[in-house]
Amino acid sequence: MESGKELFDVTIIGGGPVGLYGLFYARLRGMKAKIVDALPELGGQLVTLYPEKNIFDVGGIPRIIGRDLAKQLVEQALSLNPTVCLGEKVISFVRHEEAGQSDFELITENGTSHLTKSILLTAGIGAFNPKKLEGRGIENFEGKGVHYFVLEKKEFKGKDVLIIGGGDSAVDWVLNLLDTAANITLIHRRDGFGAHEESVREMMGSRADIRTSYELKMIRGDSRVEEAVIYNNKTLEETTLSVSEIILNLGFHADLGPIKRWGLEIDKGGIVVNARMETNITGIYAAGDVASHPGKLKLIATGFGEAATAINFAKKFVDPASKVYPRHSSDMKSLPTSTAD
Ligand SMILES: Cc1cc2nc3c(=O)[nH]c(=O)nc-3n(C[C@H](O)[C@H](O)[C@H](O)COP(=O)(O)OP(=O)(O)OC[C@H]3O[C@@H](n4cnc5c(N)ncnc54)[C@H](O)[C@@H]3O)c2cc1C
């Protein structure tokens, strides 16, 4: 995690496809650029909502699944060595007006801060919060064996793991932890899975114990998770599993949250921008799903164009001597190699 008092030309809030493309473009234009995302992983909706779904409408790519498009966008963005801060949800900003300069300080939920001359908001439909199960003792065990994200596989090495869910994330984590965990049980409250068929087939043939029509009844343990009581929602038969780690993969809620109270003009849930992707606050730009303008279409392809427009105008804003319109990317002779350029 990176934060601190280093001043960036542009800080991009939101590491979905549009923010990632904006990050690449900002570095291409020689800007000192940083991206901040609330999630532990880059990719936005591509990785959280539809990692296995096909996408057919991105120019130059006949067909690609969400996860692979995210991977290519990350590769492109990181090729120009930007600064990346994950697991940090931006909640507010203050503006420092000193000696004719006007910089922003972004504040995150974790208490870290980021100094920047301009902001590109690519927060999409908002920060994703994992859906939780009410009661059942879960709250008492968050951080003590109950997980909503897998940050490091090694945490599960040699452990007995229970995974709850039937979507892509749940199935992917069963497959991913097969080489790490001692035992894996997956429970899903329905008969069928929402995950990609190929992955479900692979999981069903694996050593994992898969139980459909099963739900969590309660978690037991002293200072950490020790047991999970599960039940069959058709027969009500209960089973006690000896597990030390429980991963809940039940999907996400998305919410723009505090950004709605920044004084930005909002229309139909989106942040109003003009043709330069400028918001009503000088120095703050928006692009992608979060931006609202006449004729808005929430597509990856349109978001890429909006991000390029926003960054070109942000470049002119932070460096008035520069051109807005760079013309050919191949003419950018001194492609930057590090944020210190
Ligand atoms: C099921 C489904 C299928 C789709 N299929 C297609 C398709 O085939 N083709 C197509 O073009 N489009 C498709 N879309 C739409 C497409 O996914 C979106 O247009 C695209 O993801 C928008 O990208 P974005 O970068 O603007 O936002 P997002 O992908 O939503 O990313 C926003 C990021 O911002 C982060 N964030 C939000 N708030 C904060 C904060 N306060 N602090 C830090 N980080 C924050 C979030 O964690 C997230 O990572 C589909 C959407 C869905 C749901």
Image (spheres, rainbow, N blue to C red):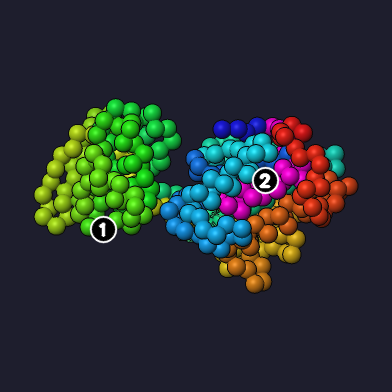
Q: At x 33% / y 55%, what residue is drawn?
A: 197
Cα separation between marks 2 and 1: 40 Å
Q: Secondary structure at mark 2?
A: helix
- Decide if ligand 1 comes within 8 Å of the CB at mark 1: no
Q: At x 51% / y 55%, what residue is drawn?
A: 64
List x then y, in percent, for residue 219. 23, 39
Residue 181 position (above or below residue 307): above
Does the rendering let one see residue 128? no
- Marks 2 & 1, CB-CB < 8 Å contact: no
Q: Secondary structure at mark 1?
A: loop
> Where the N terminus falls, by quadrant?
top right
Disc ID at residue 192: 1
Looking at the image, how many numbered discs can be counted on the residues?
2
List x then y, in percent, for residue 141. 31, 36
Between 340 and 255, the residue placed more toward the observer is 340
**Dot 2, crowdedness within 10 Å: few (<14), some or many (≥20)?**
many
Please, what is the three-letter code of the amino acid marked with disc 2?
Phe
Between 230 and 260, the residue placed more toward the observer is 230
Q: Is residue 30 magenta?
A: yes
Between 57 and 9, the residue placed more toward the observer is 57
Residue receiving disc 2: 24
Q: Which residues are magenta?
A: 5-31
N-terminal label among 2 and 1: 2
List x then y, in percent, for residue 274. 73, 64
Between 29 and 213, the residue placed more toward the observer is 29
Q: Residue furthest right?
A: 321
